[in-house]
Amino acid sequence: MSVSGPELLQRYRPWQRMFEVGFWLSLCVINAVANSITQVIDFRRAGETLHTWQPAVWETSSAVAFLLLTPLVVWFTRQWPPDWNRWRRFLAWHLLGSLLFSFGHVVLMVAFRHVAYSFTELDYSFGNWGIELMYEYLKDARTYAGMVLMIEGYRFILRRLQGEARWLDLQTDEPCNDEPAAPERFLVKMLGREYLVPAARIEFAQAAGNYVNLNADGRAYPLRSTMKHLQQKLDSGRFRRIHRSYIVNLEFVAEIEPLESGDARIRLHSGHQLPCSRRYRSALHPA
């Protein structure tokens, strides 16, 4: 019995966070154990003496620092996702990201090692910081690049399973107007098949890097667009901008809860709760 992409994704969703956390945790544990054993073997081959626990401390401290920085890397990749139209900016930002990642990794790693060594009779010395930082960066830059590739590859697979939307090309011989008509439906490509999603069924849209997620019928379809461009294309009588990251379909709004800050909280019939900033409160008033 074959399972379709959406069905497979729906089964995976309850386990998604557990899988993601387990993946990074398992990766760190395996690397720490393997590298510790390798270092012990290398020292013994060189005829140098060391306590067996030392490589374990070195590798564990590095792994813990890596784990603490992983959520920040995931967040950073959402802010600067791959964009081949602006690949120079993408590379520049991720070059900066790799530098920050390496520096944070080294600082945390050294701090953890000093704490661990304080319980022993030995002293820990990181050495010359200038030289060691450069040495560590040469390793951390490759680690960072590998993380970005794995994260974006994983997101690519999820997008393929849930379907990626695009504007439905309208074939017409009529001359183009200055104000193009709002699209009545979007074309969703999913695992080699194409589906039409009516715009009227979209409950809300949420910004996600270079994409905007169109949420309809309990699913999110990524559309490569900006919020500004999407807002210009959608029917203004039905869709309203309520936040820098959200556009809502007024037909699905169940309740608007004003907040003391001047902002508001919007609850949809589906149970979703969306933020509404004070800047966009007036957009909810009847025209």
Image (cartoon, helix red, strand yellow):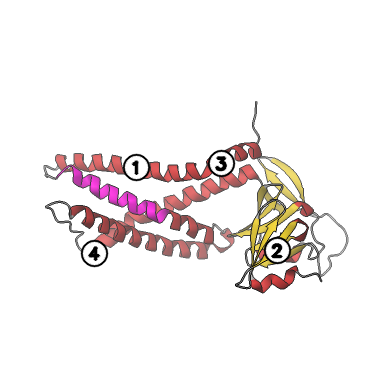
Q: Range of the magenta residues?
A: 51-70
Q: Which mark, residue 14?
A: 3
Characterize the local packing of mark 3: few (<14), some (14-19) or many (20 or more) Cα atoms within 10 angstroms. Answer: few
- For numbered disc 2, what is the local secondary structure? strand
Residue 80 in view in this figure = no
Q: Quadrant of the C terminus?
A: bottom right
Give the secondary structure at mark 1: helix
Identify the mark nearer the N-term, 1 or 4: 1
Q: Main secondary structure of the magenta part?
A: helix
| Distance (Cα) linking label 1 and label 4 | 27 Å
User: Residue 182 at what x, y percent from top left?
Assistant: 80, 61
Q: CA distance from mark 2 to mark 4?
A: 55 Å
The label on residue 249 is none
Residue 106: where, in percent of width, then height? 30, 59
Nearest to the eye among marks 2 and 1: give it. 2
Taking the magenta stretch, the answer to whether it contains residue 63 is yes
Q: CA distance from mark 3 to mark 2?
A: 29 Å
Sequence order check, earlier mark of 3 and 2: 3
Q: Secondary structure at mark 4?
A: helix
Q: Is residue 140 left or right of residue 162?
A: left
